[in-house]
Image (cartoon, rainbow, N blue to C red):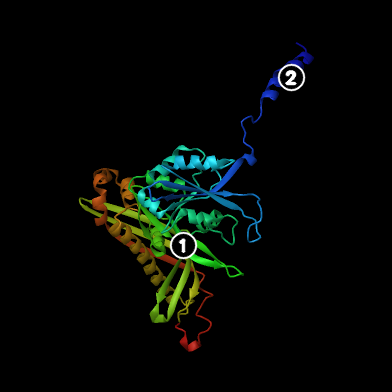
Amino acid sequence: MNLKMKSILCIGLLFPVLIISGCWDRTEINDLAFISGTAFDITDDGETLLSLQIAIPSSGMGESGQQDRFFVLSATGKNANEAFQKLQNQSSRRLFTSHRSVIFISEAFGRNGINDVLDVFTHDPRQRLKTYIMVVRGGKGQEVLRTKYPFEHVPTEAVKEMEGLGGNLSATLRDFFIEVTSEGINPVMGAIGEDVYSTSAKGSKNKLFGLMGSAVYKDLKVVGFLDQEETNGLLWATDRMKHGRVTTHLPQYGGSVGVIVDHAKRQMTSQVNGDKIKVNIQVEGQASLVENNTHLDVSRPSNLLLVQKAMEKSIELQIRKALDQVQKNYKVDSIGIGQNIYRNNPKEWKLLKDQWDLKYPEVEVSIAANLRINGAGMAGAPLQLKEKEIIK
């Protein structure tokens, strides 16, 4: 077969491929409705109220003279699937979840159990595991979706940015699934609630929501909340402290000192001797001094050491407060003491597992913190103090 015949044969073979290939099943972007946020509430009849925040690339002018960048659709159903199908029937475009940033669970819905909701997320491959999931404390998730934020066009983006800044307990679907399926630990997720009102130049007020600690889960139900200080203690104890702020009050020296933590790590050890279980939590961190309202000249090593010790006690107190809440009050192992025993003493955990709910509240926990403060050399004492008022 000569070269010319080979060329003709190749073209003949490629021609059918060219005419039948292509994205025959593609969906045009104009046929999609991009969901930026989802909220789950519960009705008085016990049904699921599902709300979707849908982004609008461009739209008409709103009352304020600015473009509306989102709208909210809501529907009720016996379960999440039924409510979602009703919303799809209301939409002229296919509902697309892959761009969703945040999922909000109202407190009332969470206390009733979120097992059915998680089942939807585990079976649908279109769900992004990096989506944040949060509890709306004392309110409705639907209200959060409708709230307008000054800095962001879409409210869920504001919450996403707040979560990403660190210093709070940020939980994604992936994080939650890992904890739910892990031995010896109960999941915790961030909480949001009605916080402040913003006031425009015209004097109109707009309700805003802010991060408010964390929600504690047991058996996939919300059983309680931790405030911000207790949440900080939980972050330290679970090795999730990234960027936190610690303030310690020194009334004997006339004020308080504040630092920002920029590095932290935790070590947990456990010992099981019959019915006695002892756990030691050790945390270490590095921080930068950002505030000094005391009479201390913190550029002096002795004064800096004094502040450092006071900071360590504050961190230990934060961890202790968190532990008291989850261990004594809620009786939920949110810190992962059982997980530590499971990983390091699997034989002991096999014996403890079935009675962990009874054993866990009696576990003896010791806490120790070691903090190193950097950047204090140029701080010295407050500039407004006179020389005789400074403690050197």
Q: Is residue 308 above or below residue 346?
A: below
Q: Residue 4 location, x and y as percent?
A: 79, 15
- Which quadrant, please, contains the C terminus? bottom left
| Residue annotated with mark 1 | 194
For the residues labelled 1 and 2, the Cα–Cα distance comes to 67 Å
Mark number displayed over residue 11: 2
Residue lying at 52% horizontally and 74% vertically, measured from the top left: 377
Quarter in which the N terminus is drawn:
top right
Residue 328 position (above or below residue 7) = below
Task: Please indicate, yes or no, whether residue 84 appears anywhere in the rendered image.
Answer: yes
**Residue occupying the far front of the picture:** 45
Specify the amino acid type for callout 2.
Ile
Earlier residue among tags 1 and 2: 2
In-image side of 275 versus 200 (left or right): left
Q: Using the image as rendered, state which of residue 377 and residue 27 is in the foreground.
A: 27
User: Whole-percent x and y of residue 389?
Assistant: 46, 87
When the figure is inspected, residue 16 is found, relative to residue 299, above or below; the finding is above
> Answer yes or no: do the residues labelled 1 and 2 have beta carbons within 8 Å?
no
Q: Which mark is residue 378?
A: none
Q: Which residue is at 50% across, 41% downward? A: 86
